Amino acid sequence: MSRLLVVAAGIAALLAMPGVAHANQVYAAHCDGSAFPVDTFGVMDTVCVAGDVDFTCPVRLGVRLPGADVYVMPTGGGPFSVPGVHFETLGGAGSFWDIEVLRPPLVPGTYDIFLDENCDGVQDGDDLYEIMSFTVGGMLECTAPPGSPINPGIPSGAECRGACGGDCPSTCTPAPTLNVCVDDADLCEHMDCSYAGVTCGTHMGCRTHDDCYDACAAAGASWTCWRGCDLDCLNTYGLPCGSWARGGGPYDGTLTFYGPPMGTASSPGLCSGSC
């Protein structure tokens, strides 16, 4: 074969490689031959790495090829905290792709990638350490509580607004725990959310009185503003205001308030059980 044909064959081989890798780099990718950088994976995905190495590693006596040891670990774990994966590249180009590093089911969290360029088990200036390179799951969140929250986060700091009595009075009763499943079709995973709540007696007089108190707090008014709210209740409803202040009736209905959600870790599959 002529020298010209050898050079042409070498160029063709390089052009056939995935084109996103550059010198001395490493990143996560899907194991599909594309070598396209990916920063978010589902719990049922397989994670590969791709990139380019600048150094050679000993293969056997007298033989060295471009290669490295790669380590993928939860963020903060540090290099060499998990078993590494050794690989070698052929043809002297140094590009690599589809090096499988993690198999499903994956543990949700953020992951680092460490590339030991010389395969010497020592972290030095020749190596690459990509912090928080990719995330597995972790994108799901429980939604805000349904209906009215126990703590609405208003200036007064008061809770269970509209219930008869101060905040969530002792006359409130525990509500059945509400369980909700949320999922992400793209990541094929779900999480379970639960909401604990209380059910309280309410009346128009209590709701109006709470609105008045909350307006006083939002305006930064003095104690006389609150006393005005009390007098308005007495002038409109009379004696029941004393019972309402202690959480008693008469009521014209009930209100259920929920606390913040408690969520489980992400799990494989959708709420329906399949993807």
Image (cartoon, rainbow, N blue to C red):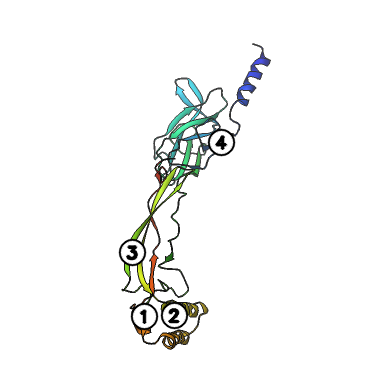
Q: In the rendered view, tell whether residue 96 sits above or below residue 10.
A: below
Query: Which label is found at residue 215?
Result: none
Q: Report if the CB atoms under discs 2 and 1 are less than 8 Å apart.
A: yes
Report the amino acid beneath label 2: His
Q: Nearer the viewer, residue 251 or 259?
A: 251
**Closer to the N terminus: mark 3 or mark 1?**
3
The answer to which quarter of the image holds residue 259 is: bottom left
Q: Nearer the viewer, residue 185 or 30?
A: 185
**Closer to the N terminus: mark 2 or mark 3?**
3
Mark 1 = which residue?
Answer: 244
Report the amino acid beneath label 4: Phe
Label 2: state its secondary structure: helix
Alpha-carbon span between mark 3 and mark 1: 21 Å
10 Å crowding of disc 2: few (<14), some (14-19), many (20+): many
**Closer to the N terminus: mark 2 or mark 1?**
2
Spot occupied by residue 27 in the image (x, y as percentages of width and height) = 52, 38
Alpha-carbon span between mark 4 and mark 1: 65 Å
Q: Report if the CB atoms under discs 2 and 4 are less than 8 Å apart.
A: no
Query: Which label is found at residue 209?
Result: 2
Label 1: state its secondary structure: helix
Report the amino acid beneath label 3: Ala
10 Å crowding of disc 3: few (<14), some (14-19), many (20+): some
Alpha-carbon span between mark 2 and mark 4: 61 Å
Q: Report if the CB atoms under discs 4 and 1 are less than 8 Å apart.
A: no
Alpha-carbon span between mark 3 and mark 4: 50 Å
